[in-house]
Amino acid sequence: MDESRDETANEAYCETPAATPDRAAGPPYAECVLCRKPTEYAESVKGVTLCPVCEWQEAQRTACSG
């Protein structure tokens, strides 16, 4: 069995894509889609934007449990 090929496959499988866009340098900030508070992202960011508190809570909900 070729172990180096298996390690390469595992590394590619375990890579985490960038899930969040870059933080904005300044206002205007986008609103959080859950609580409507300002986020750290620019208004021009596409997709779901969450404030730091909601981001943390969402990460807790979706984290692996074991």
Image: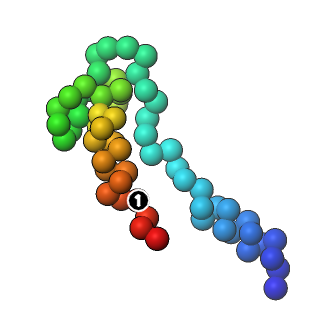
* Residue type, mark 1 in image: Ala
Q: Position of residue 10 (x, y in %)?
A: 66, 68
Q: Position of residue 13 (x, y in %)?
A: 60, 65
Q: Which residue is mark 1?
A: 63
Q: Is residue 47 visible?
A: no
Residue at point 40% right, 21% down?
24
Q: Position of residue 2 (x, y in %)?
A: 82, 79
Residue at point 30% right, 48% down?
57
Count all numbered tags in the image, as a single digit.
1
In this rendering, is residue 60 above or below 45? below
Q: Is residue 17 left or right of residue 65?
A: right
Residue 55: quadrant of the picture: top left
- Between 17 and 65, the residue placed more toward the observer is 65
- Between 25 and 53, the residue placed more toward the observer is 53
Task: Check the picture and name the quadrant holding the N terminus.
Answer: bottom right
Q: Most extreme residue toward the bottom, as rendered?
A: 1
Residue 33: quadrant of the picture: top left
In this rendering, is residue 34 above or below 62? above
Callout 1: few (<14), some (14-19), or many (20+) C-alpha neighbours within 10 Å?
few
Q: Secondary structure beneath disc 1?
A: loop
